[in-house]
Image (cartoon, rainbow, N blue to C red):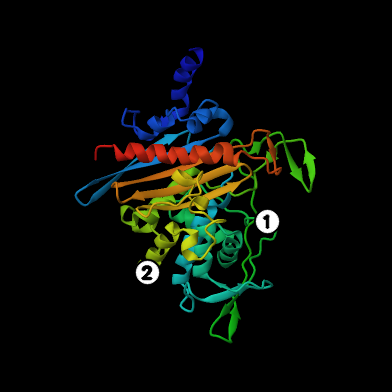
Amino acid sequence: MAKIRFLLIVFPIFFTACKDHITDSNILKMALSSKNPNIKRVMDSVERYEIQIRYTQIDRKDDSVSFSDYDFQVDKNNYFYPASTIKFPIAVLALERLNAVDSLNRNTNYYIEGDSIETTFAKDISQIFAISDNGANNRLMEFLGQDTINSKLHRKGIEPVRISHRVGYHTDDLMTKPLIIYLNDSTTAPTQPTQNTAAIPLKIDNLEKGTGFYDDGSLVHEPFDFGLKNYYPVTAQHALLKRIIFPEKFRPSERFNLSREQHDFLLETMHTLPKNIGYDAIEYYDGYCKFFLFGDTKGPIPDHIEIYNKTGSAYGTLTDCAYIKDEKNNVDFFLTATILVNKNGIFNDNLYEYDTVGMPFLAELGREIHKLEMNRKK
């Protein structure tokens, strides 16, 4: 009984809403109050997991669409490592830049100078969303450069954000590598490399995490410092996704300059499952990059559910930013959430509770909200 009383007292401290007050119609609050063990074990020790969640309820009347945002512990000044979620804005900006270069389109063949992988922009973007391929993302970063990525996102109102490094490996090299572009079957031309600005340490909360980390195989007994890492908070992730799904809801200056064909390609790519573009369905099961609803299962995602999203997982942090659409049940909503699962406080040891705590929490959170949305009066 004492434990129940404690939860009732502290829960409102952690829970805030973007509306003026919390009401019984707050689906996010109801979902997090679930007795399901996958949610309850996290909520019973909520401070340990550093969760942040934004859920957007979508309402329609005639031809108008309105959003109601609800938050749980969302704080742009409370750092979490965004991992592969940064690949989403990079893919969008790569498409936008292709519009500005007459000689390029998304099917143009190219490779990075010094690399043997030949690809196309379309293939890279497809790989980013289907299997979260690091190489595909890093090639697009060479195409854009960190400074361009950051400045363009800021101008669109996607902030705060700071992309400072490639993913999968870190380097201090601030110069982008040239792309070798195929002008035709036999003629190539290089792009000009660009010099980018060196990152400076972030000045927000919770940048130093844990009690130790491995560096070149040796355990260092001090917190792991994320001050120079990529920074892409829940607010910025959610804002970008809204602009892509409902661009008409935003001012022209806040939208991305994508043609109708590019926009359709992006949406199709975002929800396409790995098996539908040739990847092995056993290794890359449907929920491989769809954490909400299906991340803890290896079964098929029903055809009537489409998830337009980008996930990230690294350093014990799982994040998903998704627009979920269930045409059969007339349900759609936005959901962005992040959770840290690093019980021993050591980073780079690969001993994270992804499968036992993090993924079950995110999957169940998606299922709870989906279930409540199905029963919501609209």
Of residues 197 and 246, the one nearer the viewer is 246
Badge 2: few (under 14), some or many (20 or more) residues near its Cα, within 10 Å? few
Task: Report which residue position mark 2 lands on.
Answer: 261
Instruction: Tell me which corner region of the image, top left, top right, bottom left or bottom right, holds residue 111.
Output: bottom right
Query: Which label sits on residue 147?
Result: none
What x and y, as percent, mark residue 124? 53, 66
Specify the quadrant that holds the C terminus: top left
What x and y, as percent, mark residue 232? 53, 47
Label located before the other in sequence (1 or 2): 1
Instruction: Identify the secondary structure beneath mark 1.
Output: loop
What x and y, as percent, mark residue 332? 33, 47
Q: CA distance from mark 1 to mark 2?
A: 33 Å
Residue type at the position of mark 2: Glu
Badge 1: few (under 14), some or many (20 or more) residues near its Cα, within 10 Å? few
Residue at the limit of the structure toward the left, as seen here: 62
Residue at the limit of the structure toward the bottom, as seen here: 186
Of residues 3 and 97, the one nearer the viewer is 3
Residue at the spot 51% in from the left edge and 76% down from the top edge: 108
| Residue 145, above or below 359 | below
Task: Report which residue position mark 1 lands on.
Answer: 169
